[in-house]
Image (tube, rainbow, N blue to C red):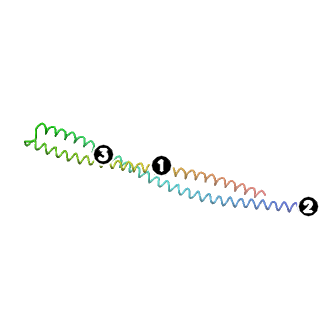
Amino acid sequence: GRVEVAVIEENKSLRKRVYEMESTIAQVNTQLEEAREAQKASLQLARQAEGEAAVARAELARVEELADGSKALAKGHKNTVTELEYALKDAREELEKRGGGDKDGAALRTKVADLEKELAAKAAEVTASQYNEGVHKSAKERLERLLAEADGSLKMLRDENQSLNTTVKRLEREKEAARQALEQS
């Protein structure tokens, strides 16, 4: 009688352990499924962030090109303005020396007036070029900030994905250990 009771108790204990291990395996399977879903979502977000970063990099390169062009244009206009200022100064000095009464004086007055108009137009172009340069510079800074944010998000997503990989591997080991324990019992 005692041996029978002991066997029955051992059987109950074994069934309880089997049930607990099967329950553990089921829980681990659920956790694994959740971790894999999170991993998929994380990878999808990372791909999306990489795409957005690539677009931002391309836009940044385009804006840098535009900014360089605006800068070069502004420099060219400034050089032209400087040349016109010297030419105007020379023409005014020549006009003062000669006086403006004769035919040559009238031609010099016309030359001075033309140089003044050209100088005003070029000065306006310099202002416009400097404005464009500023616009491109601020766009470049904004894109650099966005790119830094995108790179930060991407790093965070990669870290999260690495963490999820570690979790999946740990859960697979737990599942395997529980399965082996179940087989041994």
Q: Residue at x 79, y 61 (%)?
A: 16
Determine the image quadrant of residue 94.
top left
Name which residue type carries label 3: Ala
Name which residue type carries label 1: Ala
Q: Nearer the viewer, residue 162 or 95?
A: 95
Residue at image mark 1: 148
Q: Residue at x 42, y 48 (%)?
A: 141
Q: CA distance from mark 2 to mark 1?
A: 75 Å
Q: Nearer the viewer, residue 134 or 67?
A: 134
Image position, residue 160 (x, y; %): 58, 52
Q: Which of pointers 3 and 2 lies earlier in the amino acid sequence?
A: 2
Image position, residue 123 (x, y; %): 26, 46
- Mark 1 crowd level (few <14, some 14–19, many ≥20, 10 Å Cα): some
Residue at image mark 2: 2
Kind of element beneath mark 3: helix
Image position, residue 149 (x, y; %): 49, 51
Q: Residue at x 39, y 49 (%)?
A: 138
Q: Nearer the viewer, mark 2 or mark 1?
A: 1
Image position, residue 139 (x, y; %): 39, 51
- Against 65, residue 92 (above or below) is above
- Mark 2 crowd level (few <14, some 14–19, many ≥20, 10 Å Cα): few
Residue at image mark 3: 74
